[in-house]
C-alpha cells in the first residue's frame, strides 16, 4: 500500500527549504526571445534596466545558470511559512466519487496569505543591499501589494502601491492590510503620475488595469533617484524565486509515493504557475516525463487561449520593454471580474514560450463555474480559496471527473496559491446571484491587437 493511502498531509522539515532557486532557461529547447527597447526596437542590455532594478536582479533576469543560491537572510525569512504543506484532498475525491488522487500545494499560510512573498522578500533583500530607499509597484487583487508591503517592512524600505481601481474598491481590506504594513496605496489610475492623469483624462470612468498600474509604478520609480520598481509576476527573476514551490512539491510527492500525471495552476502573469510547474517541466525536459502541465485562466481575460504570440509592451502607456508573449494587446481593459490577479493582458515570456513549444496547455473557465468549484472545495476541504486559485481547482475537478468517466486512476496536483479571506465581497455576490459569466468579445481582442508595436 502506498504511503499516500494512509496520509493526508505531507510536510517537510524547515531544513528542507530549497537552498537554490531553479532557472528553467538552460533546459529550454530554444533560447528565450530577446527583450527589446521600446524606442529603438533593439535588444536591451543590463544598463537599460538599471534605472528600475538593482544589478543583482538584472543578472538573475538574464542568467543562464541552472541554479542560483538563495541568500541565507532570505531563507531565514522563508522559515516563517516555508516549507508549505501538500494535502491530499480526500474529502473532495469522495464527493466527486473519482478514482483520481487529488493533491494540492497550499501557499496560503504565508503572512500575506499567498505565494507572493517568495519573490517579494527576495526583491526587498536585493534592493536593500543596493541602497534603495523605496519600492514602487502595482497590484491587481492586492495579494502582491500585501506581499511587497510586508517584505519592505522587514527590510525598512518605503513602499508605494498602485492598485487597480476595480479591486481597490472591491477589496477594501487588502488596502487596510497594505497600509498596516506601512505602505502608501493609490487607486489606479491615479492623479499621482502623468500616466494616470493621461488615462483619467481619456477615460474618467475606467476600472483600471494591471497595464495602467504598471505604467504608474514604473514612471514613479524612473522619476525618483531613490526608488526602484518591483514586479510581482511576468519577469524571469520572479519566476525564478517562486520555484521553491515546485522544488518542495517534488520532495513531497515522493513522500506521498506518487508522481503527478497532471500539474495545474492558475495563470495571470505566471508567477504561481511557474513556481509549481517549472521544476516539473524541467523533469519533463530532462527525463522525458509525460506529465501534463495545465494553465487555467478566466474566459474574461483569455490571454493564453485567445491571445496572439507576439512582441508587446508590458504596460499600457508604453514605458516598459517589448517582450514576446501571448497577449491581448497592451490597450486591453479587462472587465471587473473578481479574480483581479488574473486580469493582465499578457503573461510571462517563459510561460508563453513553453506553451508555444507545446510543453504546457491552457484552458479558460467562466466565472460562475470557478466559484462553483471554490464553494465545493471549501465545503469538502475547509479552505476558502482566493478566486484566482479557484481556477486551478476548477481544472482539477474537471480532470478528476474525466478520470471518473474513463475509469482512470489519475494523480492530480494543483497549486492553491492563496486563501480568499479578503474576497468575501465576491462570495457574497456569488451567493446573491449577482455574478455573471463574461467571455471577452473576439472583436474587442481584435481591436486591441491592432495597437501591437511594429517589430522588424
Image (cartoon, rainbow, N blue to C red):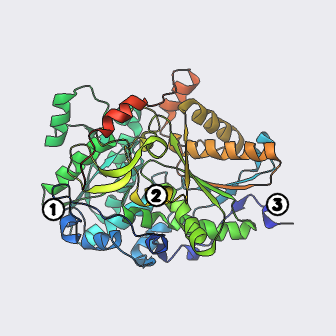
Q: Relative to 267, is 165 on the left or the right?
A: left
Local packing at callout 1 (Cα closer than 10 Å; few below 14, some 14-19, many 20+) is few
The residue under the point 12% across, 61% down is 225
Q: From what the image shows, is residue 232 above or below residue 184?
A: below
Which quarter of the figure has residue 58? bottom left
Residue labelled with disc 3 = 5
The residue under the point 53% across, 52% down is 417
User: Which is in the foreground here, disc 1 or disc 2?
Assistant: 2
Q: From what the image shows, is residue 156 above or below residue 137?
A: below
Residue 226 got which mark? Answer: 1
Regarding residue 450, the answer to whether it shows in the image is yes
Query: CB atoms at circles 1 and 2 under 8 Å apart?
Result: no
Residue labelled with disc 2 = 351
At numbered mark 2, what does the secondary structure look like: helix, strand or loop?
A: helix
Task: Compute the Cα span from label 3 to label 1.
Answer: 55 Å
Regarding residue 115, the answer to whether it shows in the image is no
Q: Earlier in the sequence, mark 3 or mark 2?
A: 3
The percent coordinates of residue 365 (x first, y second) are 56, 37
The percent coordinates of residue 315 (x first, y second) are 27, 47
At numbered mark 3, what does the secondary structure look like: helix, strand or loop?
A: helix
Q: Relative to 92, is 78 on the left or the right?
A: left
Residue extending farthest front: 456
Amino acid at each position: 500500500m502506498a504511503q499516500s493511502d494512509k496520509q493526508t498531509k505531507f510536510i517537510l522539515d524547515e531544513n528542507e527549504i530549497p537552498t537554490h532557486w531553479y532557472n528553467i532557461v538552460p533546459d529550454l529547447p530554444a533560447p528565450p526571445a530577446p527583450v527589446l527597447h521600446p524606442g529603438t526596437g533593439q535588444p536591451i542590455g543590463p544598463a537599460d534596466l538599471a534605472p528600475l532594478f538593482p544589478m543583482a536582479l538584472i543578472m538573475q533576469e538574464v542568467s543562464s545558470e541552472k541554479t542560483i543560491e538563495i541568500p541565507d537572510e532570505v531563507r531565514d525569512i522563508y522559515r516563517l511559512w516555508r516549507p508549505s504543506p501538500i494535502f491530499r484532498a480526500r474529502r473532495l475525491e469522495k464527493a466527486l466519487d473519482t478514482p483520481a488522487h487529488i493533491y494540492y500545494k497550499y501557499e496560503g499560510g504565508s503572512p500575506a496569505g499567498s505565494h507572493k512573498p517568495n519573490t517579494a522578500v527576495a526583491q526587498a533583500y536585493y534592493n536593500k543591499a543596493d541602497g534603495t530607499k523605496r519600492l514602487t509597484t502595482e497590484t491587481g487583487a492586492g495579494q502582491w501589494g500585501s506581499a511587497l508591503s510586508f517584505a519592505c517592512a522587514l527590510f525598512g524600505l518605503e513602499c508605494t502601491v498602485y492598485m487597480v481601481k476595480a479591486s481597490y474598491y472591491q477589496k477594501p481590506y487588502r488596502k487596510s492590510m497594505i497600509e498596516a504594513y506601512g505602505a502608501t496605496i493609490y487607486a489606479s489610475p491615479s492623479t499621482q503620475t502623468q500616466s494616470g492623469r493621461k488615462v483619467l483624462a481619456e477615460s474618467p470612468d475606467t476600472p483600471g488595469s494591471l497595464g495602467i498600474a504598471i505604467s504608474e509604478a514604473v514612471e514613479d520609480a524612473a522619476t525618483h533617484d531613490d526608488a526602484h520598481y518591483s514586479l510581482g509576476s511576468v519577469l524571469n527573476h520572479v519566476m525564478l524565486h517562486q520555484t521553491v514551490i515546485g522544488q518542495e512539491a517534488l520532495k513531497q510527492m515522493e513522500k506521498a509515493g506518487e508522481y503527478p500525471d497532471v500539474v495545474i495552476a492558475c495563470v495571470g502573469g505566471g508567477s504561481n504557475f511557474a513556481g509549481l510547474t517549472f521544476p516539473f517541466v524541467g523533469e519533463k525536459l530532462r527525463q522525458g516525463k509525460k506529465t501534463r502541465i495545465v494553465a487555467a485562466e478566466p474566459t474574461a481575460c483569455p490571454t493564453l487561449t485567445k491571445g496572439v504570440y507576439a512582441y508587446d509592451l508590458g504596460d499600457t502607456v508604453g514605458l516598459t520593454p517589448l517582450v514576446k508573449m501571448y497577449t491581448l494587446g497592451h490597450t486591453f481593459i479587462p472587465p471587473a471580474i473578481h479574480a483581479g490577479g488574473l486580469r493582465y493582458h499578457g503573461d510571462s515570456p517563459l510561460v508563453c514560450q513553453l506553451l508555444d513549444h507545446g510543453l504546457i496547455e491552457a484552458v479558460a473557465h467562466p466565472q460562475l463555474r470557478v466559484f462553483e468549484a471554490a464553494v465545493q472545495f471549501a465545503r469538502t476541504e475547509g479552505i476558502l480559496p482566493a478566486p484566482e486559485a479557484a481556477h486551478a481547482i476548477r481544472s482539477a475537478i474537471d480532470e478528476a471527473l474525466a478520470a471518473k468517466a474513463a475509469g482512470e486512476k489519475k494523480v492530480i496536483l494543483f497549486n492553491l496559491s492563496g486563501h480568499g479571506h479578503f474576497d468575501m465581497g465576491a462570495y457574497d455576490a456569488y451567493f446573491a446571484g449577482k455574478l455573471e459569466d463574461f467571455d471577452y468579445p473576439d472583436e474587442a481582442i481584435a481591436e486591441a491587437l491592432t495597437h501591437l508595436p511594429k517589430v522588424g
